[in-house]
Amino acid sequence: MKPYKVMEIKESVFENNVEQADLLRASLKEKGTFLLNLMSSPGSGKTTTLVNTLSRLPSALNVAVMEADIDSDVDAATIAEQGVKVIQLHTGGMCHLDADMTKQGLEGLDADGLDLVFLENVGNLVCPAEFDTGAVKNAMILSVPEGDDKPLKYPLMFSICDVLLINKIDTIGVFDFDVEAVIARAKALNPDITVIPMSARTGEGVADWVGWLESNVAEWKNNQGVQ
């Protein structure tokens, strides 16, 4: 028997999504649970980043992961191997999660008492940016091999994210990738975005990412119950 659940979840009505997302965030605040929505293209290194992040978080934090995919449970299996509570969400062909789908996942996860929940969203740079999941913060990964033009091609994704992880920075000598251009383009769309160059493979920059997480989780919990 697998050490995690696999759920089939259904999309809610689009028009109600903003309201449902706000209600979910309010519920998470009351419980002191920080939900992070992690988005990227397939192959950018989301799961590898999660694995290396989980190993560096303080043991006092009660952490869990929701893995969203159209099908398969390979990512959930990888997370389960780390000894972390995880649930696999199958979207039934949908290329994103909305707030109600996320709520279904949290209920299946039995998220009460958790300090931090990672939602690894379905891999693409279009649909996930259009739907508020109810997360406290949005994060995205852009890997060096994808190219530095992605803020120009997918502006909404960069506009709605609180933090941008430029992953696979250890491969920058192989690809024509301008880090400063990405930062400038992202900041033009979203002046408040935090940008962290890193390599999930080598560990470079991961401490900065974990520091950002710890700071934001602490702030959220310190303001617990404050609307």
Image: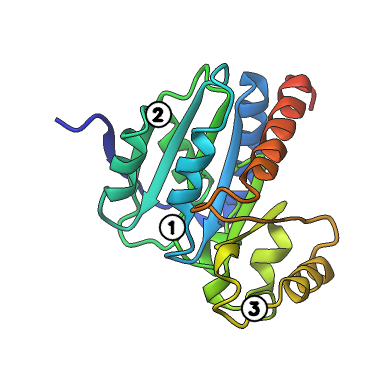
Residue at 59% across, 75% down = 173
Q: Residue 24 at what x, y percent from top left?
A: 59, 35
Q: Residue 36 at what x, y percent from top left?
A: 59, 41
Question: Is 18 on the left or on the right of 200, as rendered?
Answer: right
Q: Is disc 2 placed on a helix, strand or loop?
A: loop
Q: Which residue is label 1 attached to?
A: 122
Quadrant where the image shows the N terminus: top left
Comparing marks 3 and 2, which lies closer to the viewer? 3
Residue 84: numbered disc: 2
Question: Is 28 on the left or on the right of 47, as rendered?
Answer: right
Residue at 28% across, 32% down = 4
The reply to whether the C-beta atoms of the residues labelled 3 and 2 are less than 8 Å apart is no
Question: Is 206 on the left or on the right of 107, as rendered?
Answer: right
Q: Which residue is label 3 attached to?
A: 177
The answer to which of 198 and 79 lies nearer the viewer is 198
Residue at 63% across, 75% down = 154
